[in-house]
């Protein structure tokens, strides 16, 4: 069983634990909301499992720490990176001239691109929202408010393919959601067509429509299927092969903070972010 198959099996197990809802309409709605929170908490546990499995060559999610990166905390655990593959190849060489310990870059230019991506996310926060920073001594069981990572994906025809994933909480008063951007460098084997590309994002499915921005077509999943880790996401493949996914959600995912009343970006705005040159990273 390879890494992708393991993650798919884990996702199936997580989906199977949701209990049936009561028949009362009011109770059913409440149970559905609680189930969604529990499911997202389960994804957080899946993120912890991914960190453990990194020792065996499966993707490791890491977050910035005082000494560079530390093992994944509650931030990216809620949105574990699903795209890495097992490989028998040596890991890429780090800035110290030695192979990386795993897929995650903890220093050097790739690592810096992850930081840059986070900065660019903060730069597009819409009016009326803020992107709060993590408080000092944040409890370990709370999702981080900002996170980033840079990860080696694969070597395709002699070209190293990397991904950068960063996200920030978007707050409006006491309510909090999130905005995540994931970039894959040139050379990936992701689809070129807008909707098939959008539906490749973490293997999630949903109702997709093609949105035209100027002369450019962008795939936007406007309504998720059973896997609702995000409410909406857009996908675009640049002519040079760089792929950008932009996802938004009305909840942070830790069950501790009330979610946003509405999504921060409209569908056209989300599509425009996917083609924004600020996210066009190599």
Image (cartoon, rainbow, N blue to C red):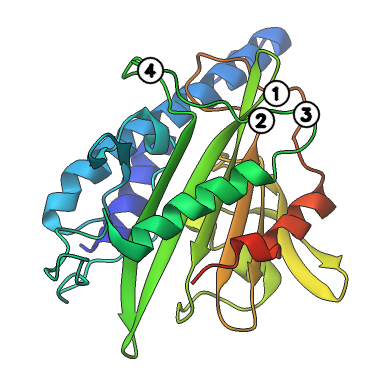
Place of residue 200 in the rendered image (x, y in percent of width and height, measured from the top left): 54, 63
Q: Which residue is mark 4?
A: 136
Q: Please identify, in this view, whether the residue under mark 4 or under mark 3 is nearer the observer.
A: 4
The residue closer to the viewer here, 21 or 267, is 267
Q: Secondary structure at mark 2?
A: loop
Above/below status of 281 relative to 268: below
Comes first in the chain, label 1 or label 4: 4
Q: Disc 3 to disc 2, how far (Cα)?
A: 7 Å
Residue at x 54%, y 43% (from the top left corner)? 227
Reading the image, the residue beneath label 3 is 262
Pointer 2 and pointer 1: residues touching (CB < 8 Å)?
A: yes
In the image, is 21 to the left or to the right of 87? right
Q: Which residue is mark 2?
A: 250
State the image coordinates of residue 244 (x, y, percent, origin top left): 59, 64
Q: Residue lying furthest bottom in this view?
A: 157
Residue at the image point whose x is 43% and y is 54% from the top:
114
Q: Residue at x 57, y 76 (%)?
A: 191
Quarter residue 24 falls in: top right
3D distance between C-alphas at marks 2 and 4: 24 Å
Q: Split into 4 quadrants, where in the image is the N terminus?
A: bottom left
Q: Give the mark, 4 or 3, whose residue is nearer the N terminus.
A: 4
Distance from label 1 to label 3 (Cα)?
5 Å
- Which label sits in the foreground, 2 or 4? 4
Residue 235, can we see it? no
Residue 159 placed where, x, y %? 35, 85
Asked if residue 205 lies left or right of residue 275, the reply is left
Cα gap from disc 1 to disc 4, whole angstroms: 24 Å
Q: Which residue is mark 1?
A: 260
In the rendered view, tell whether residue 246 sits above or below residue 241: above
Secondary element type, mark 4: loop
């Amino acid at each position: 069983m390879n890494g992708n198959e393991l993650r798919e099996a884990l996702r199936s197990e997580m989906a199977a634990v949701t209990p049936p809802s009561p028949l009362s309409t009011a109770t059913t709605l409440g149970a559905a909301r609680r189930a969604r929170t529990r499911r997202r908490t389960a994804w957080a546990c899946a993120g912890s499992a991914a960190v453990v499995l990194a020792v065996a060559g499966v993707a490791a999610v890491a977050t910035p720490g005082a000494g560079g990166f530390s093992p994944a905390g509650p931030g990216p655990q809620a949105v574990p990176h699903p795209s890495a593959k097992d490989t028998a190849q040596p890991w890429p060489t780090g800035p110290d001239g030695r192979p990386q310990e795993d897929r995650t870059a903890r220093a050097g230019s790739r690592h810096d691109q992850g930081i840059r991506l986070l900065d660019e996310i903060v730069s597009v926060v819409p009016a009326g929202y803020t992107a709060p920073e993590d408080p000092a001594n944040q409890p370990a069981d709370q999702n981080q408010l900002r996170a980033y990572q840079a990860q080696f994906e694969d070597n395709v025809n002699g070209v190293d393919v990397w991904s950068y994933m960063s996200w920030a909480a978007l707050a409006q008063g006491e309510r909090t959601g999130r905005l995540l951007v994931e970039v894959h460098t040139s050379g990936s084997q992701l689809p070129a067509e807008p909707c098939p590309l959008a539906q490749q994002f973490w293997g999630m499915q949903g109702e997709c429509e093609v949105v035209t921005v100027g002369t450019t077509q962008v795939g936007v999943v406007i309504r998720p299927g059973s896997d609702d880790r995000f409410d909406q996401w857009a996908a675009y493949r640049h002519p040079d092969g760089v792929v950008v996914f932009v996802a938004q959600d009305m909840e942070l995912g830790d069950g501790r903070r009330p979610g946003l009343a509405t999504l921060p970006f409209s569908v056209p705005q989300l599509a425009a972010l996917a083609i924004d040159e600020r996210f066009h990273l190599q």
